[in-house]
């Protein structure tokens, strides 16, 4: 059977049976598209590649949850978009936490200095 010509829903059905060759075809079919999509927002090749691989791993892990009617392309792009949004949320949160830590450190240092001076 030649997998590369099969539609996504049949490949997903094959994945559910544990067929890794069918998954390889889906991976090849969507990797570059998702990578290009994520690069527009991330502007970091390594990070974009890591995120796409994470999405594809989740696809394999959740293969039993998919039905033949599900269109896998839109699902993958929506998952990629959500992963990018989460990345920027975490990055923003880390920035806020660092700024708070710096402010707390300044307050602590000034209190310690004042006590030492007195």
Image (spheres, rainbow, N blue to C red):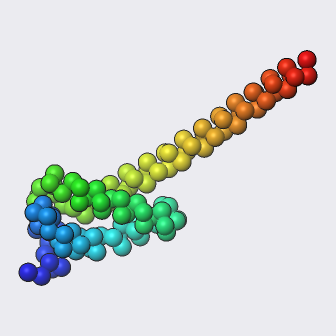
Name the image quarter holding residue 75.
bottom left
Q: Residue at x 32, y 54 (%)?
A: 79
Q: Does residue 68 appear to the left or right of 62 in the view shown?
A: left
Residue located at (87% from left, 22% from top) = 116
Q: Quadrant of the N terminus?
A: bottom left
Q: Judge whether 9 appears above or below 2 on screen.
A: above
For the point 30% across and 60% down, which residue is it? 57
- Estimate the x, y position of residue 35 in percent, counting from the top left: 40, 68
Residue 94, quarter of the rendered image: top right
Q: Position of residue 89 (x, y in %)?
A: 49, 45
| Residue sticking out furthest to the bottom | 2
* Residue 4: quadrant of the picture: bottom left
Name the foreground residue: 89 vs 58: 58
Q: Residue furthest front?
A: 116
Q: How many marks?
A: 0
In the image, is residue 85 above or below residue 54? above
* Residue occupying the far top of the picture: 118
Residue 55 seen? yes
Q: Is residue 53 left or right of residue 4?
A: right
Q: Is residue 86 above or below residue 36?
A: above
* Above or below: residue 87 compared with residue 72: above
Instruction: Quarter of the image for the C terminus: give it.
Output: top right
Asked whether residue 74 is in view, the answer is no
């Amino acid at each position: 059977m030649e997998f590369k010509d099969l539609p996504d829903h049949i490949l997903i059905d094959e994945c559910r049976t544990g067929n890794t060759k069918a998954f390889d075809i889906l991976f090849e079919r969507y990797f570059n598209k998702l990578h290009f999509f994520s690069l527009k927002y991330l502007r970091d090749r390594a990070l974009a590649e890591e995120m796409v691989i994470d999405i594809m791993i989740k696809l394999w892990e959740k293969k039993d949850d998919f039905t033949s009617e599900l269109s896998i392309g839109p699902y993958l792009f929506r998952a990629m978009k959500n992963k990018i949004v989460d990345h920027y949320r975490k990055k923003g949160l880390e920035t806020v936490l660092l700024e708070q830590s710096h402010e707390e450190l300044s307050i602590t240092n000034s209190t310690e200095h004042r006590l030492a001076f007195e």
